[in-house]
Image: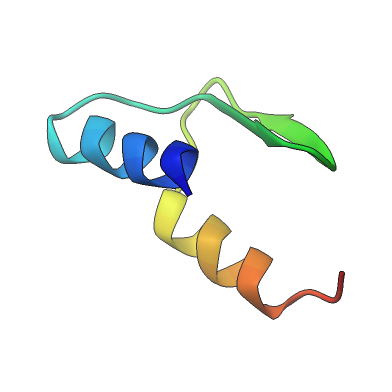
Amino acid sequence: NVGSNAAQIFIDHGHKVIAISDSKGGIYNPNGINIKKLLEYKKNIRR
């Protein structure tokens, strides 16, 4: 997935990801989103 890869690159370069979305919806956190935890959660939920 291009979006998750891009988000990880941003994090690796010291940027904070505060919003992310996919075809099912999106989330926003002004303090930043833990991308690794989000991807793990998304992998484990039912579709």
Horizontal side, residue 9 vs residue 19: left or right: left
Residue sitting at x 87%, y 69%: 47
- The residue under the point 34% across, 26% down is 16
Q: In this view, does 6 lie above or below 37?
A: above
The single residue placed furthest to the left in the displayed view is 13
Colouring of the image: rainbow
* Residue 28: quarter of image: top right
Q: Residue furthest front?
A: 2
Image vertical order of residue 34 relative to residue 31, above or below:
below
The percent position of residue 24, horizontal first and vertical second, equals 85, 43
- Residue 25, how many percent across, how many down? 82, 36
User: Residue 36 is drawn in which quadrant?
Assistant: bottom left
Q: Which of 39 and 47 is in front in this view?
A: 47
Asked whether 44 or 28 is in front, the reply is 44
Q: Say left or right for 40 vs 22.
A: left
Residue at 66% in and 64% down: 42
Q: Position of residue 46 (x, y in %)?
A: 85, 76
Residue depicted at x 56% and y 57%: 38
Q: How many discs appear?
A: 0
Residue 10 image position (x, y, % from top left): 26, 30
Indicate whether 28 appears above or below 47. above
Q: Which of 11 and 23 is in front in this view?
A: 23
